Amino acid sequence: MRGVFRLARLAPHVLHGLWIVKRRFGQLPAVERQRLVQWWSRKTLAILGISLQHEGGAPAPAGHLLVANHVSWLDIAAVHAVLPQARFVSKADVRHWPLVGGLVEGVGTLFIERASKRDAMRVVHQTAAALQAGDCVAVFPEGTTGAGPALLPFHANLLQAAVATEAPLLPVVLRWHEPGEHFSTAARFIGETTLVQSLWAIASARQLGIAVQVLPPIASTALDRRALAERARQDIARHLG
């Protein structure tokens, strides 16, 4: 019954978010858009019974590239609950997810065909332009979701945008947890798990939580993209453990 009740509350909240994105979002100033993104994200977590803890995070400099580990499709909502200014780079098929795709696209997400090197270069240029304009762009350099405790290798391609523009890197640590588990299994979105199965597991979980830790920025001026990726991976891994 817990899961049914939460999903019944989530449906109108998602539809409300879609209405805001379609009818109002583009007409609002940036500060107001960020306020709505943060409100919607925090309420999404609350409806699903997910507690949010936030640590660190002095105001980041304008024009920075946020990098985080990746466990769940809800990672974007968790980051937006703390850093609503972030524009994510996401795999292109998310655009076609029911309801969620419209929301993600509406808040300025950059979509990438991960199997295409040409498309990756296009997104690097878009990301660099956004960084030069003072935006916060967020990427999951693992490229896919992992189980949580151990990080996958970090892909360095998109980090070239930070190197080219000398924009700082902002590492963010995401740790999903629940009673009896240091790293939550309910939040994992791996293997053959479908979006519907993952949503049900999350909605049915008891005392699921997400800890978002913002680490100190890393200067990109003295590093190439691979060294920058490895430095960020080491910082996140150290705090994740």
Image (spheres, rainbow, N blue to C red):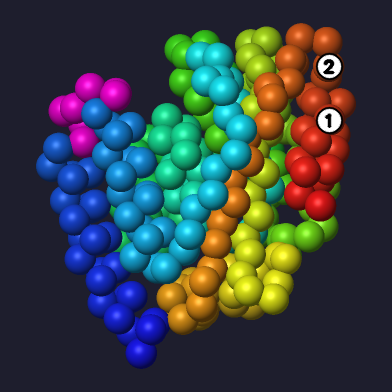
**Residue at image location 60% in from the left, 39% down from the top:** 55
Is 70 magenta? The answer is no
Amino acid at circle 1:
Arg
Magenta-colored segment: predominant secondary structure: helix
Q: Is residue 86 visible?
A: yes
**Label placed on residue 223:** 2
Look at 40% across and 68% down and name the residue there.
48
Query: 142 or 120, which is in the foreground?
Result: 142
Determine the secondary structure under disc 1: helix
Query: Residue 115, labelled with which disc?
Result: none
- Give the labeled residue for mark 1: 231
Q: Residue furthest left?
A: 23
Residue nearest the viewer, comparing 226 with 201: 201
**What is the distance, in whole Å, between disc 1 and disc 2 at their CAs?**
9 Å
Q: Residues within 10 Å of mark 1 (few under 14, many from 20)?
A: some
Instruction: Indicate the position of residue 26 as horizontal and vertical percent values.
Output: 21, 31
Tell whether 11 sits left or right of 52.
left
Bounds of the magenta segment:
25-31
Q: Quadrant of residue 28?
A: top left
- Taking 197 as reference, is 168 above or below it? above
Labels 1 & 2 near each other (Cβ < 8 A): yes
Query: Quick one: label 2, few (<14), some, or many (20+) residues within 10 Å?
Result: some
Q: Amino acid at mark 2?
A: Leu
> Residue drawn 45% across and 50% down?
77
Residue 191 visible within the image: no
Percent position of residue 131, x then y: 53, 17
